[in-house]
Amino acid sequence: MLKQVHLYVKGDVIGVGFRAWTKIQAKIAGVGGWVRNIYDQPETYGEEGGVEAVVQGEEEKVEKMINLIKRGPPVSRVEDVKSFWEIAKEIFAEFEIRK
């Protein structure tokens, strides 16, 4: 059954390859969705901005991605990840980096 989670990632996650790393991990895990940097929501991400992502796929694969994103790539520093399970309104065939 298709599951979807919306993630809000706070920390040192901009300018460190976080989006590209997430895309690679998503391809390995076999999930669809998207990831993007957010700069204009300091109440959610802090003054430096953060990363927003939607991950969609089988529950086990989505859970694996949540755990990977909570750690992040070695050059990042993830402070907090808020996750919200959603009903999928759109099916993502691939995982993409959005602007």
Image (cartoon, rainbow, N blue to C red):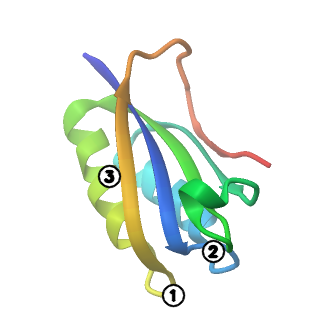
Asked if the residue at tag 2 contacts the one at tag 1, i.e. Cβ–Cβ closer than 8 Å, the answer is: yes
Relative image position of residue 94 (x, y in whole percent): 57, 35
Query: Looking at the image, is 39 positioned above or below residue 33?
Result: below
- Who comes first in sequence, dot 3 or dot 1? 3
Q: Distance between the Cα atoms at labels 3 and 2? A: 17 Å
> Which residue is outermost to the left?
60
Residue 81 left/right relative to 47: left
- Who comes first in sequence, dot 3 or dot 2? 2
Amino acid type at circle 2 is Gly
Residue 55 left/right relative to 92: left
Give the residue at mark 1: 75
Name which quarter of the figure residue 61 lies in.
top left
Amino acid type at circle 3 is Ile
Secondary structure of the residue carrying tag 2 is loop
Mark 1 nearby-residue class (10 Å; few <14, some 14–19, many ≥20): few
Give the residue at mark 2: 17
Any part of residue 99 in sight:
yes
Q: On residue 66, which mark appears? A: 3
